[in-house]
Amino acid sequence: MLTKMTIGQKLIMAFTTLALLMLGFAWFATAQLSNIYRDASEVTDNIVPSIRASSQMHVALLDARRAELNMVIDALGKDSASLSNSTQNFEAAKNQFTAAEQRYGSMPFVSEQDRNIFADLQAAAAKYFSVHDNLQTAIVQGDMVRVQSLIKNESRTALEQAGQDGLELRKENDRVANQLTKQSEASYERAKLLSTTIGALTLLFVIIVAWLLIRQIRNPVMTLLEQTRQVAAGNLTSQLDMQCFSHDELGKLAQGFNEMQSNLRMLVNEVSGSVVQLGAAAEEISAV
């Protein structure tokens, strides 16, 4: 196929193929970078805020428990001022938990397990705050036996369950974050390997194309140069072998060179014949 193409067509085909290879490489690199960016965005925009919110919920529950224990101590000591302050601290911790819970719920869940654990945490926290309402009612009524029973049993059990769910929630987010990190690393390694491979193949392609183009141009030019030297030396009998040339500009030049050489040979033959005839005529004239 290359033998029937002009030099311009060969160059256009070579550079077009090279451009397509570069476009393919650019597309692949962009796709891999998009995957890495997507995973990184998932970690920074969703998982990190989710971990922060889950930690805030866990801390808020611990603060609420601390304030609740202080309420019981203040109730036992009949210190109304401290009891009021401890109650306010509990409400503040509850509000912090509610705010963190709303933030967490507003973000996309990283997995179905994350959704289920969050639902369990909400249920456990709701139960804990419900038990606390009963505890607070018992404090107001002065039923300290009921208060001690609630603080040691129902309240502690509900808090432990909520705390365990909070830790599981954070572990699930950590697991997904590690998984996305590994995916990003794998994408990077895969992109690096394929980029190196494509780069090496592109370099090999350029070398092969350059060698073919040089071969397609240099060899015919050297053949033409050698034939020119022979003609300059007076050898008009040998002609160029057209099988050594393609159907391109150099092939047309070689064909024109052969035609010029044939015309020169015919001209030389005609001149030689004319010289012979002229010599014979001169001899006849001399004889007369």
Image (cartoon, helix red, strand yellow):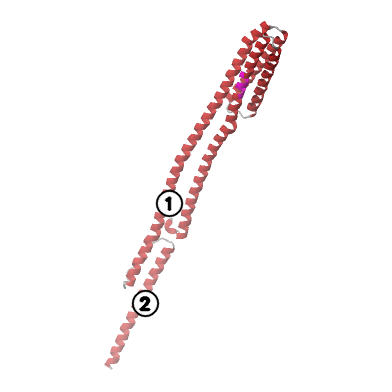
Is residue 67 shown above or below 20?
A: above
**Is residue 267 among what the camera can see?**
yes
Image quadrant where residue 214 sits: bottom left
Q: Given the current orientation, which residue lies at the most extreme top position?
A: 145
Residue corresponding to mark 1: 206
Image quadrant where residue 122 sits: top right
| Category of crowding for the residue at label 1, using alpha-carbon neighbours closer than 10 angstroms: few (below 14), some (14–19), many (at least 20) | some
Q: CA distance from mark 2 to mark 1?
A: 47 Å
Q: Residue at x 32, y 84 (%)?
A: 277
Q: Residue 284 or 215: which is nearer the viewer? A: 215
Q: Looking at the image, is mark 2 or mark 1 earlier in the sequence?
A: 1
Q: Which residues are magenta?
A: 56-62
Is residue 184 shown above or below 117?
A: below
Is residue 170 shown above or below 209?
A: above
Circle 1: residue type: Val
Across and down, in percent, residue 36 comes to 53, 37
Residue corresponding to mark 2: 267
Across and down, in percent, residue 143 comes to 70, 6
Q: Residue 175 or 261: which is nearer the viewer? A: 175
